Amino acid sequence: MKLLRDKVISDGIVLNNQVLKVDSFLNHQMDPVLMQEMGKEFARLFAEQGVTRVLTIESSGIAPAIMTALELGVPLIFARKQKSLTLREDIFTEKVYSFTKQETNEVTVSKKFIHATDRVLIIDDFLANGEAAFGLARIVEQAGASVAGIGIVIEKAFQPGGKNLIEAGYRLKSLVRIAGLEDGQVQFVEVDEA
């Protein structure tokens, strides 16, 4: 997606050869026009999958996921990382390790929001090792529902997450794929390799 790629080039900051900082447009301050365009692109990529719900993890995945849900005309569900006094029983839970934050969270989704008949599209901001996507997929599968696909805003293709998800049989589409972050520069996977 050229608009996103251009934004990564102009505003992304390479912190080291593993971490790309995009807080000026994706996960602290958000570019609403970019979010809307990403939602349209995800909706186009998964238009034929019969999506009935979109699922993400709070908080950085919410903006692209809500725009995707809006374009598809379906509800958005986000898995909570924090315990809620109102969400104690009848929940699906999974442990998810965050590469960026170097911590494990137990994420929860109320059972009343995902049903066995659902085809759930998982959306997330980054893909490194695939832990978040796999955790969300396990929640969908706990509900007896099916994963319609996994949409990622930025995939770090030099880490194993994408390969692992595809090998597990999931339909994966990433808007931007990064080949490397060496020498403070973002190297992209060429479009024809995606």
Image (spheres, rainbow, N blue to C red):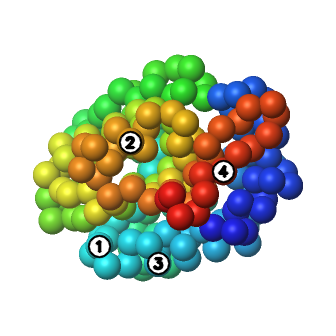
The amino acid on which the numbered mark 3 sits, given as a three-letter code, is: Arg
Residue on which the image places disc 4: 188
Earlier-in-chain disc, 3 versus 4 = 3
Marks 3 and 4 sit apart, C-alpha to C-alpha, by: 22 Å
Earlier-in-chain disc, 1 versus 4 = 1
Q: Which mark is residue 44?
A: 3
Q: Secondary structure at mark 3?
A: helix
Q: What is the quadrant of the N terminus in the image?
A: bottom right
For the point 32% across and 58% down, the residue is 171
Marks 1 and 4 sit apart, C-alpha to C-alpha, by: 27 Å
For the point 56% across and 20% down, the residue is 102
For the point 45% across and 51% down, the residue is 56
Q: Secondary structure at mark 1?
A: helix
Earlier-in-chain disc, 2 versus 4 = 2
Q: Which mark is residue 163?
A: 2
The amino acid on which the numbered mark 4 sits, given as a three-letter code, is: Phe
Of marks 2 and 3, the one in the foreground? 2
